[in-house]
Image (cartoon, grey):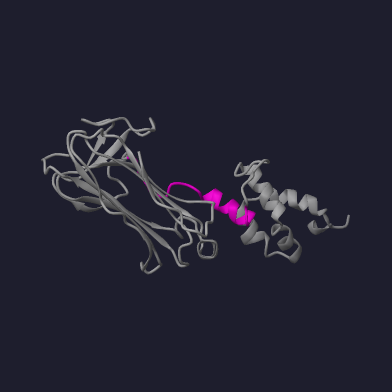
Amino acid sequence: MALVSINQLPESILLEVFMHLPARQLLLNCRPVCSLWRDLIDLVSLWKRKCLHEGYATEDWDQSVADWKVFYFLCSLRRNLLRNPCAEEDMRSWKIDSNGGDQWKVESLPGAHGTDFPDPKVKKYFATSYEMCLKSQLIDLKAEGYWEELLDKFRPDIEVKDWFAARADCGCTYHIRVQLASADYLVLASFEPTPMTVHQWNDARWTEVSHTFSDYPPGVRHILFQHGGKDTQFWAGWYGPRVTNSSIVVSHRMTRNPAPSVAQP
């Protein structure tokens, strides 16, 4: 019986096989095999089907997608890149940059003179003291699965969110700084708003701070996230801003006009 080359199969069958192979294996191992496989793997229809199959898009998807292959990978990588954002593992994964007053502390919601968090799944927060408390994480984007061409050619939006609240009985000042940096840690883009002060006898509500990095320069390889603050009364204990549920997400969107920053309750 004569051997039959796999390439003699109808292209529709080959595409069906490719549909069920891991995406990275398709690009790294299958695409270089021959020109036929390369052309099939580069088809827009294949990557759109893979997106539909994985639930990254729906049949009635009405958003414009410039490149379905890139869209697929950005969706598959999408997650919060900050570890331990809600203090479930105490201070693990955070670098303590400033530990003033009575130092950082993890407390359970709602806390003394506090309010419940909008998302009931969030159970804890990080509390600051009467001198500056700052903590940070440095994210290595290549170590997280993002490769250079994806970052430099397509420059997907990078969405930053953080939440803070004051105690009702004490004023506080909240700080946040987020920087996009190159491989050698040169700062390419930065978000560092004026510190936000909440006065004593406030409603202790939680405030979301958000910023989207769009159309940033090529060369981004790291993201530095730092936040914290201190109280305004200089009281012993943990009366400064409370922070939790921080996130940094590389979006599937690729905006060429920078999006505004917002702070809202």
Q: Where does residue 105 sit, x and y in percent of width and height?
A: 21, 41
Is 121 situated above or below 14? above
Vertical order, 110 against 97 (above or below): above
Query: Residue 209 appears at what percent x and percent y?
Result: 35, 46
Side of 264 relative to 217 (left or right): left
Q: Quadrant of residue 27?
A: bottom right
Camera-side residue of 158 and 198: 198
Tell me what residue is drawn at x 74 percent, y 48 percent. 16
- Which range is magenta? 65-86
Viewer-proximal residue among 257 and 129: 257
* Residue 242 lies in quadrant: top left
Could one spot residue 20 in this view of the protein? no
Observer-nearest of 180 and 136? 180
- Side of 166 where 190 appears, left or right: right
**Residue 152 point in image, percent of width and height:** 51, 65
Is residue 157 within the magenta segment? no
**In which quadrant of the rendered image does the C terminus lie?**
top left
Residue 26, placed above or below residue 123 = below
Tell me what residue is drawn at x 39 percent, y 33 percent. 119
In the rendered image, residue 161, in percent from the top left (x then y), is placed at: 39, 46
Q: Residue at x 47, y 67 (%)?
A: 218
Q: Is residue 230 above or below residue 140?
A: above
Position of the N terminus, as image quadrant, is: bottom right
Camera-side residue: 185 or 230? Answer: 230
Q: How many badges with numbers are in the image?
A: 0
Tell me: 213 left or right of 206: right
The magenta stretch spans residue 78: yes
Q: Would you say residue 143 is visible in this rendering? A: yes
